[in-house]
Image (tube, rainbow, N blue to C red):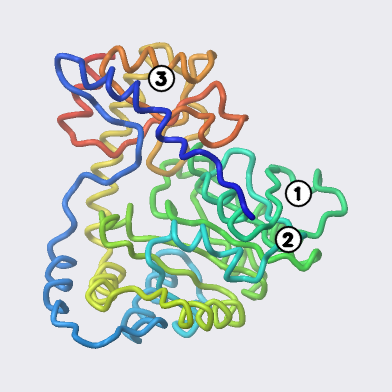
C-alpha cells in the first residue's frame, strides 16, 4: 500500500490569512496560476466544438497531433517531431502523477528526480509503489539502474536551465542504464537569459537524432493561459507513446473533444504567446528589482515564471515576514529539503497586484 505526503499547500493557509488581513488585501505570488485571459481564438474554437455528442479519441484528432508536431518543429527545434508520437493528456499533473504506473513501474523499481523538484514526481513514484530517489548528479547514484529518470529544465521551482551538453550526458547515461528519461518542459517558451536558452530533450543535438527511451511532457496551462482546460501532451519514443496510449484507452483517460479543438488552435498560434511573454517579462523585471531592493538575493531564475529568492534565513521566516506585508510566496521546502532557505515567487499576478507588491516592498 502506498503512502502519500501531506498536501503541502495546506500548511500555507495561516500565512494566507495573515496576508489577507493587510489593509490593501493580499498579493498572492505563491501559486503559479495564470490570471490573464485565455486568448479569444482559443475560446472561440472551444465554443465551435461544444456540440460533441460522441466519445472523443484518446489518441487525439489528427489536427491536434499535427498542430503539436508543427509547434515542436517551429518553436523547439525538434526537427524529427512526428504527429504519430503525440498523445494529448488531461493536464500534465495527471500524467506526471500516473506516468510511473502507466509505464509499468512498481515495487523494486526506482524513480529518480531532482533534489529540488515539483512534488508530483515523488507522488507518482509512490502511487506506483516504486522507490523515490532525489539526486542532482546521476554519477552519485552509483550502480543503480532506475526505471525512470525525470529532468526538469527550465526548473520548477528554481528557474534553472540545463545546457545542451548536460542534457546530452543525461540522455547517454539513461540509455546506458536502460532507464526511461522523461523531460518536463512546461516552461520551455519562458526563457529570460539569452546566454542560456531552454532546449527540449528531443532536439537532435541533445538526443543524437533518436527519441528512443525519451519522453517529453508539455502543457498549455502557462503558455496559453489554459490551466482551466487541463490540456497537455506527451511525445517522444513512438514505442513508449504507444504503450501509454493502450493503457489510457483502457482507463478512459481522454481529453474532451472541445478541449482538443482548442489545443490545436493554441499550438498553431505563436503571437498570443509572444504577447504573454512580454507581460511576464515586465512583471518579472518589476518584482526582481523590488525584492532585491528589499534585501533578497535571486538565484538561478534564468527561465520559468518564478523567482527563486532568499534572505539567507529559514524559508518559513521569510514567508511570515512577507505575509505581514500582505504578500504571499511559496516556501522553498515544498520542493525538497534543499530549498529550506529559499522562497518561490510567482510572476502570475495581475499588473495591479504586482505594482501593489512593489509598493509594499
Q: Identify the residue position indicated by label 3 in the image.
A: 319
The residue shown at (32%, 33%) is: 284
Query: Residue 229's x, y, as percent?
Result: 27, 62
Disc 2 residue crowd, few under 14, some 14–19, many 20+, Cα 10 Å: few
The residue shown at (39%, 15%) is: 320
Q: Left or right of 101: which side holds 322?
A: left
CA distance separating discs 3 and 1: 32 Å
Work out whether residue 359 or residue 133 is closer to the camera in this orientation and state it: 133
At mark 2, the secondary structure is: loop
Query: Residue 48's x, y, as percent?
Result: 12, 78
Q: Identify the residue position indicated by label 1 in the image.
A: 138
At mark 3, the secondary structure is: helix
Comparing marks 2 and 3, which lies closer to the viewer?
2
CA distance separating discs 2 and 3: 37 Å
Question: Where is residue 207, by image quadrant?
Answer: bottom right
The residue sitting at the right extreme is: 143
Q: Identify the residue position indicated by label 2 in the image.
A: 107
- Mark 3 or mark 2, which is nearer the start of the sequence? 2
Q: Are marks 3 and 1 in contact (CB under 8 Å)?
A: no
Vertical relation: 303 (above or below) 26 = below
Q: Left or right of 106: which side holds 27?
A: left
At mark 1, the secondary structure is: helix
Amino acid at each position: 500500500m502506498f503512502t502519500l505526503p501531506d498536501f503541502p499547500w495546506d500548511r500555507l493557509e495561516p500565512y494566507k490569512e495573515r496576508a489577507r488581513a493587510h489593509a490593501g488585501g493580499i498579493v498572492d505570488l505563491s501559486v503559479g496560476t495564470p490570471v490573464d485571459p485565455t486568448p479569444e481564438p482559443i475560446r472561440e474554437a472551444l465554443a465551435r466544438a461544444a456540440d460533441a455528442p460522441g466519445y472523443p479519441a484518446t489518441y487525439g484528432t489528427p489536427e491536434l497531433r499535427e498542430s503539436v508536431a508543427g509547434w515542436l518543429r517551429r518553436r523547439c527545434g525538434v526537427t524529427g517531431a512526428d504527429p504519430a508520437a503525440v498523445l494529448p493528456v488531461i493536464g500534465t499533473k495527471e500524467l506526471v502523477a500516473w506516468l510511473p504506473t502507466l509505464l509499468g513501474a512498481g515495487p523494486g523499481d526506482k524513480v529518480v528526480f531532482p533534489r529540488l523538484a515539483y512534488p508530483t514526481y515523488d507522488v507518482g513514484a509512490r502511487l506506483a509503489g516504486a522507490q523515490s530517489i532525489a539526486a542532482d548528479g546521476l554519477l552519485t547514484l552509483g550502480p543503480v539502474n532506475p526505471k525512470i529518470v525525470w529532468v526538469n529544465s527550465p526548473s520548477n521551482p528554481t528557474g534553472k536551465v540545463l545546457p545542451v551538453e548536460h542534457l546530452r550526458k543525461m540522455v547517454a547515461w539513461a540509455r546506458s542504464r536502460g532507464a526511461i528519461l522523461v523531460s518536463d518542459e512546461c516552461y520551455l517558451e519562458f526563457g529570460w537569459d539569452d546566454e542560456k536558452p531552454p532546449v527540449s530533450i528531443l532536439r537532435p543535438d541533445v538526443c543524437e537524432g533518436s527519441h528512443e527511451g525519451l519522453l517529453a511532457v508539455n502543457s498549455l496551462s502557462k503558455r496559453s493561459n489554459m490551466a482551466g482546460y487541463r490540456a497537455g501532451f506527451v511525445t517522444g519514443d513512438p514505442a513508449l507513446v504507444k504503450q501509454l496510449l493502450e493503457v489510457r484507452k483502457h482507463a478512459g483517460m481522454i481529453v474532451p473533444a472541445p478541449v482538443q479543438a482548442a489545443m490545436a488552435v493554441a499550438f498553431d498560434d505563436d503571437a498570443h504567446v509572444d504577447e504573454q511573454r512580454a507581460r511576464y517579462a515586465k512583471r518579472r523585471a518589476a518584482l526582481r528589482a523590488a525584492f532585491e531592493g528589499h534585501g533578497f538575493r535571486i538565484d538561478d531564475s534564468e527561465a520559468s515564471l518564478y523567482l527563486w529568492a532568499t534572505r539567507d534565513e529559514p524559508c518559513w521566516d521569510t514567508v511570515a515576514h512577507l505575509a505581514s506585508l500582505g504578500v504571499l510566496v511559496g516556501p522553498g521546502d515544498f520542493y525538497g529539503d534543499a530549498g529550506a532557505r529559499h522562497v518561490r515567487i510567482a510572476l502570475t499576478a495581475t499588473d495591479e497586484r504586482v505594482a501593489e507588491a512593489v509598493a509594499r516592498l
